[in-house]
Image (tube, rainbow, N blue to C red):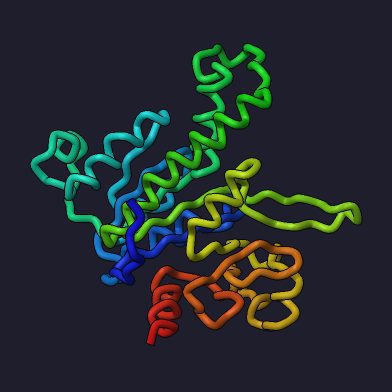
Amino acid sequence: MAKRFEDTAQGLIGIIYGRPGSGKTTLMGSACDDDRFGSVLFLDVFGNPQVLQKREKKPDIITMEKLEDFNAPYNWFLNDQSAKDPYAKELKLSPPYTTLVIDGTTEVQRFITGLITGASHTDPGTLTNALGRQGFGQLLGTMMNWAKHYIELSKMGLNIFFTCLEADKKDESMVSHFEPLIWGQSGLELSGYALLVGRLTTRLKTDREIRGKDENVVLEDTYNVLQILATTATFAKDQYGCGTTHIVNPTMAKLMDLIKQSSL
């Protein structure tokens, strides 16, 4: 049955994408430094959790090895993160968590593709099967089922952040356009669920439109830039109304400051 919309306390929903080495995992780890994010849990999917080991405050990290591994944490969150649950005891989790990071959404899609084509059960030197039209439909359906279940946890007040790789697509004039590397219709639909989509890039690879507006982007002490406002070259989204195009040397605290300021 349909129900009337109610404006309730909902967690943040965001997607951060970028090239390998642009600092996605490091940025997500900085949520541990801001009490507004609470305790942070990482579901790592071929990310780079090693970069978090040097941090004074670290998230708890679970390595996801197959698609089915996402069932247990989802159900655990749905059942109020009980510390007595066998899942929490087995992985030595310390609930309650307020922020969940899925670090490696592009790889989640590879999990799904491997299951559809049978590649997840083949030897490394074996040619895998092609993904036909029916396979792409199954990929989209499975991907969105996975994403929607996790996004719905935000209704319980949990902040949900996805990271993924960057797609560099060239148009007929060979001009690059950047967007999350989530294949086909899945990318549009997942981005539609998110309230913030940002491109994280090193300063040398920053969108020209951004570089031209801010001299700080090219200073030597600038490592990376998080772009949250779309341009002709870069897909981004900011439904929180942060009031800026980008953040130089971003941290999750800086992002939260802008989101909170916009809600005043």
> How far across and down, in percent of the image, does residue 230 sit?
66, 69
- Extreme residue in the bottom direction: 264
User: Residue at the spot x=49%, y=56% of the render?
Assistant: 193
Image-quadrant location for residue 184? top right
- Extreme residue in the right direction: 173
Q: Is residue 230 visible?
A: yes
Position of residue 247 relative to residue 21, above or below, is below
Image-quadrant location for residue 106? top right
User: Residue at the spot x=43%, y=40% of the render?
Assistant: 146
Q: Nearer the viewer, residue 46 or 178?
A: 178
Q: Nearer the viewer, residue 231 or 55?
A: 231
Side of 46 where 231 appears, left or right: right
User: Residue at the spot x=35%, y=36% of the render?
Assistant: 70
Quadrant occupied by the C terminus: bottom left
Badge count:
0
User: Residue at the spot x=91%, y=56% of the render?
Assistant: 173
- Extreme residue in the left direction: 84
> How far across and down, in percent of the image, does residue 109 sit?
53, 36
> How far across and down, in percent of the image, does residue 188 sit?
60, 51
> How far across and down, in percent of the image, does residue 13 sit?
42, 61
